[in-house]
Image: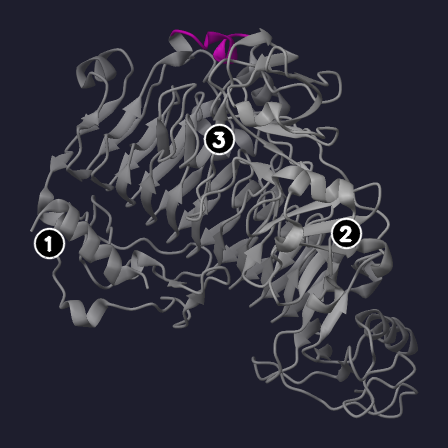
Amino acid sequence: MGISLRLAFVFFAAFYSVAGSKLGDHTTERRSTGASFGATFFVDGQYGNDSNAGTLQAPFLTLNQARNAIRTLKSSLGGSLPAGGVLVQVRGRDYAFLSAPFTLSQQDSGTAQSPIVYQSYPGDPSAHLLGGTYVTPNMYTPVTEQWVLNLIGNGTSVMQVDLKKLGILSYGDLATGGLGNCNNNKLELFYPNRVMVLARYPNISPSGVWQFMLAGKVLDTQKSFVYNSSRISQWKNTSTLWLHGFWSYDWADNYIKVVLVNTTLSAFVINNVTTPPLYGFLSSARYYALNILEELDAVNEYYVDRVSGIMYIYNPPQDKGCVSVGSTVISMVGVSYVSFVGFTMDCSRGTAVSASSVVNVTFSNCTIVNNGGGSMSISGYNNTLERLEVSGNGCGGVSVSGGDQLSLTPGFNTLKDSSIHDWSRWKRTYQPGLTWSGVGNTFINNTIYNGPHSGILGKGNDCIFSGNFLHDLCFEVTDSGAFYSGRSWISGGNIVANNVFMNIVTTEKVYLGSPSVQAIYLDDQMSGYQVINNTFINCYAGTFIGGGRSNVVMGNVYVNCTTAVHMDNRGLTWQPTYCSTGGMFNQQLQSVNYTQPPWSLHYPQLVNITTDHPCVPCYNLISGNIYCGVKQFIDFNSTIAAVQWLTSVSNNTLDCSVLNPTSNPTTIISSSNPTTGSSTSNPTTGSSTSNPTTIISSSNPTTGSSTSNPTTGSSTSNPTTIISSSN
């Protein structure tokens, strides 16, 4: 059996209430833990009334009233909650937050003994919290304005909706966005299982691949370039035209506003004051045109006239859609001991859930999809995100931060057993599925896939990434990583272990750089990582050490990669300013008092770092790895690395036996989540995926033992051994 067939086999197997209260008597419910709640309120967005008592028979109408009832209850008990806490059961209706989100502040907190739980009512469909309003087929009317028909031609496939009649008067607008800046707080249109696209040229292909044009001769690096399509010269109204492109590098994109289409020169002239091209124009830059009515010519496209308030839709589905209005669905600041269980949240213009400075907050079994920004941003301590479904966002997926770097206090935040996929609709780069920062946070058993740029991106200390499956990432860019972190000597102690990286390659044609992308990218002298017991399959580069020091790469399996491990000495060549006296890294060291406790005790190797071979990629260990079908295991001279870089490369083995399945195929084909036993469904495609670490084992190459989760004490190794990296 060939390598490709064996890989196909391996991964097809892997996929797939208080008595006497004036609020009334409330049914006492029990949580899944078996603990009793002291009070329960009910909310019904269809049949409830906020003047009701909030009982099962007389529910509230809104979540806001349930929150207010808890405040009243707490006040009646002298500022305390009843023993066991409060449960809010929310019936499976629609709850729209158009002008303001559902807002919780410190006064809305529970306690460890009396938590507050908002839960979708058992047996109902998931309660739906949305930031938009519905459009239905009976609202569509034919296009009759002659000037519009002159632009779009035959109007039979285009229908229109008057947004003003829906009470929508603010539509937002396009924005340029710098590097990593996703300014996307504008009206959008969503339908079940599909996100509509602003009218564009060229169109997105039926298979979902983004199509681009190439910039011609550059007339002014900041202002103008030649286009190569005669179709553009035929456009009649370009007053709303924008361009979106990778103007100078294939890893940096932004939007620019066109002020003139010069048909004599076949050139665009843009507003370079308010919408400058990121890093300037280069010939052959990839770009497309958008927000132009006369290119409304494909299924899933729409256009908003921001003057008249008319939205035009090409062949709209015979289903209700959602027009985003509100920026956020849930906003929490300073809240503690509050949980949300089993909700669907979507159709916001910004990030659906914003939770800052929160403690012991949990989001469990929630679907948070189709938002203009991201699904969730959470910061604080001891928070848990589990079994989330995240997709369809214009920007990133989930952002998690917490802990204090100066004192090295852990955040103890966890993201686990979640699926994050198909994001970056608006901004294609530096909007990862998972953004992380802080100290001592854990990210385990998540599946992150179908993103044009990075899957995980951030910087911090003592964080753990384990049992995650990252695949089909970085497919549209260059010089990027599925797991990316860079530019620090002090962001150490992070462990990336027992993960699977698959299909980390550039699949789209790029023109402004070589198609070099990495599964794990420790960029610009990033130091102090442990990359242990991971599996890399079909990656351009598996592990990339960009001049950093004290990194451990051990016990990994590399299959069908161009390069397994890259390392360079950029601190000694083209990037010495970062690591030299007074440079960025010295400033970082001073900011954390690195020669004093707790830093001097926790990271003793930093105490003398400024005199211990600064700028040299020293004390890296690359050992006990296995590879097969790899063009080159390392792309540097190991002898030079040992002598000049003080780096050890040893006991790495070419061994294609890792591809031989050792289990009966009928016993390992499963689409269930290895942690929960349930499948994770993709709401866009309807397909199911699972974490392949159920059939891929990477035991410790040194000891042969499994790696335990330091948070739970449970083992993260896998009982089956289709792929094993034991020494």
Indicate whether 239 appears above or below 342: above
Residue appearing at x 60%, y 71% in the figure:
342
Q: Earlier in the sequence, mark 3 or mark 1?
A: 3
Q: Quadrant of residue 510?
A: top left
Residue appearing at x 56%, y 38% in the figure:
431
Indicate whether 21 appears above or below 320: below
Task: Look at label 3 and name its amino acid.
Answer: Phe
Magenta-colored span? 573-581
Residue 593 seen in this snapshot: no
Dot 2: within a 10 Å radius of its alpha carbon, few (fewer than 14), some, or many (20 or more) residues?
few
Query: What residue is pinned by disc 2?
Result: 144
Label 2 to label 3, Cα distance in Å? 32 Å
Closest to the observer: 428 or 611?
428
Element type at mark 2:
loop
Q: Earlier in the sequence, mark 2 or mark 3?
A: 2
Of the 4 image quadrants, the one containing the C terminus is top left
Query: What residue is pinned by disc 1?
Result: 660
